[in-house]
Image (spheres, grey):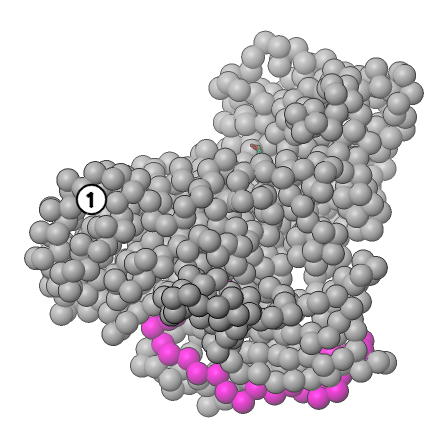
Amino acid sequence: MVHTVGEVVTTTAVQSVPGVSSDGAGHARRALELVARMTLGEKIGQMSQVNIGADHVPADLRGAIAAGRVGSVLNAVGVDLVNELQCLAVEESRLGIPLLIGRDVIHGFKTVFPIPLGQAASWNPERVREGARVAAAEAASVGVNWTFAPMMDISRDPRWGRIAESLGEDPYLSSRLAAAMVRGFQGDNLAARGTIAACAKHFAGYGASEAGRDYNTTNVSENEMRNVYLPPFKAAIDAGVASLMASFSDLDGVPATANEWLMKRVLRDEWGFAGLLVSDWESISELMVHGLTANHRQSALAAARAGIDMEMASTTYRDHLEGLVGDGHIAEAELDVMVANILRVKFALGLFERPYTDAAEHAALANPDHLRAAKDAALESLVLLKNDDQVLPLDAHRARSLAVIGPLADAPFDQLGTWVFDGDPKLSITPLDALRETLGEAVTIHFAGALATSRSRDRQGFDEALAAARRADAVLLFLGEESVLSGEAHSRADIRLPGAQEALIEAVAALGKPTVLIVLAGRPLALGNVVDDVASILYAWHPGTMGGPAIAEVLLGRASPSGKLPVTLPRQVGQVPIYYNHKNTGRPATPESFVHIDDLPASAPQLSTGNTSFHLDAGYTPLFAFGHGLGYGEFSYQRIRVSDRRITLGSSFAIEAELTNVGIREAVEVAQLYIRDLVADVTRPVRELKGFQRVRLKPGETARVSFRLGTEELAFYNRRMRSVVEPGRFQAWIGGSSEAALMAEFEVVGG
Ligand code: BGC
């Protein structure tokens, strides 16, 4: 049977201003009226965000709020605390302006979802939207009205710990998912109960931190910035995001926080962003540390001139803006614009009408619906990288005993991942819990942690683990990284499995049992040394509160894995950065030109290799490609066709292929569309993702997957930094990863 499944819609909605309020114009008017009544001190107060740093309201903060010197409080959690803060602002300050209450609600609040990189592996915008919706609902129930998410920094370097927070390496996938997260947090109406303002961060280019070391310098050409790093931010703005956060990083010599090109020219002038722009934590005072300014006064001026509306944590605005205005360095009218940006968000949130939170009006934290959503998200985040001899799913009738080995099999805290200020490990269901619960008496489980932590080098536990493995029909190794090894300020230079884990795998593999490696990690790890030692690898990221049940369902075949890699997995760290949408170079490597270091004869002459772009010791291909991921079905793609061979500029066209499940189990496949623009004003990537869709097929079933594109979706920034679609030849592939082989060609012709 052939049927057509839905087409991908890639164009995004137009932003209303700011956020997704239904009354943008009304809020703008009210904001201006309010600004007109404010003193300079009150304006600067709105531009100041203060970290509470306590579980009560400290006296100095109390006084500052009552005096109208604070616009937002960071990290105040708890209904009573937040209501007390709002009461001070609303009842005691002269103008009664409520506070923005900011918190990092990154992948869940009490109910923790998979890390964003894991959620991205679902390639399912609807799932990602739902995760943010639940996170918002829980955060709103304790008075938080502003989250610092989604993070959408394109991340091509797995050494960088913050890759865990990202949506991966691809501009298109990140854009789709970032927009979905914004919609999840903000809903259709920011003033509705249970929605909170989102914040697209970190604007921009932070993911390019040199050597993957956090906070490090970034040098990104304008063309690369526009073609690679900026698109997700534009998509978030088109989805109505209420705020943006400046990046910490030094961008081409001008830190983002003071970068007028980025913040004014691109963000405000070109894109017309009318929302709130917040600094990162102390990033204004750090301008001095960067060596851009000599003192805090200059830092305040540089950031204000760049249009940073609100200062997070540091106090340069509070301390110096009044003097800077008095001395004529910056006009008060410029501050008025910035204050209005902040106030509009407060109006859009409905805070003036409803400053207080009543927990009774909200759904309970970690309620069964939220936990179910977290499990569904975890399920779709799991990526089956390899599955030799169909070791998975485990056959509970044949495998009467299982060895469950490794420090992450039963690690309720670590499975939550980074940025879980409000997550509760006591709610976590670990893989060991879930396997025991699901299998009951039917299967004997021999558990051995083997290593105290993922970093441990102490092999004392190996004997017990090997004994467990010997007694079992199959071995499940739960290895990877603890949560603290990824996230902000947690970068690694060696991205192999840390500690003695590789040795553990080797020792277990020597027993010759069917062995499955389940990786829990905050980043793509370099698994080149161990990939051949195990039959099957399931990549589980840090899967959150409900990671255990999701993993158990997949291992036991109650669900088929459907995740796909949102980032490339290198063989070894020296290949980094390695990403699928690279340029061709003038000398691309081929199987014929590649020579391995072991194959070079002694005294080999200089020209003994094919002179193409590869590493002698690592080749040029990744271990697992972007987009890769297996299911329990087996998929075959055939008969690709483009609706028109010649496509007129400005028109739309379809690219289709037939997808058949030739396996013996029902499964979901994420069908992917890639294109290549063969000749252009600036060199274009060898492949670019342009569409994807999830398709569920029964064994033997065929679907026609169809992607409709407008020619504007072929646009890129050229040498003059214009977004253009150039007539000419293109290639298109449809398949199950960025290595898809099924290709068709088409030509775009002038209109
Ligand atoms: C991070 C931001 C975060 C902020 C507030 C900073 O260190 O870079 O991503 O939102 O802290 O916690």
Q: Secondary structure at mark 1?
A: loop
For the residue pair 694 and 465, the one nearer the viewer reads as 465
Tell me residue 385's x, y (percent): 37, 65
Picture residue at 41% right of the left edge, 43% below the top: 417
Q: Quadrant of residue 584?
A: bottom right
Tell me residue 80's x, y (percent): 52, 23
Tell me the kind of residue under disc 1.
Gly
What is the span of residues highlighted in magenta in the rendered image? 625-653
Tell me residue 473's x, y (percent): 12, 63
Report whether 176 appears left or right of 325. Answer: left
For the residue pair 292 and 7, the one nearer the viewer reads as 292
Q: Is residue 168 visible?
A: no
Report whether 169 appears left or right of 710. Answer: left
Tell me residue 290's x, y (percent): 67, 29
746 part of magenta stretch: no
Residue matched to label 1: 449
641 part of magenta stretch: yes
- Determine whether 720 is above or below 320 in the image: below
Q: Is residue 281 visible?
A: yes
Q: Quadrant of residue 469?
A: bottom left
- Determine whether 398 is above or below 189 in the image: below
- Determine whether 30 is above or below 62 in the image: below
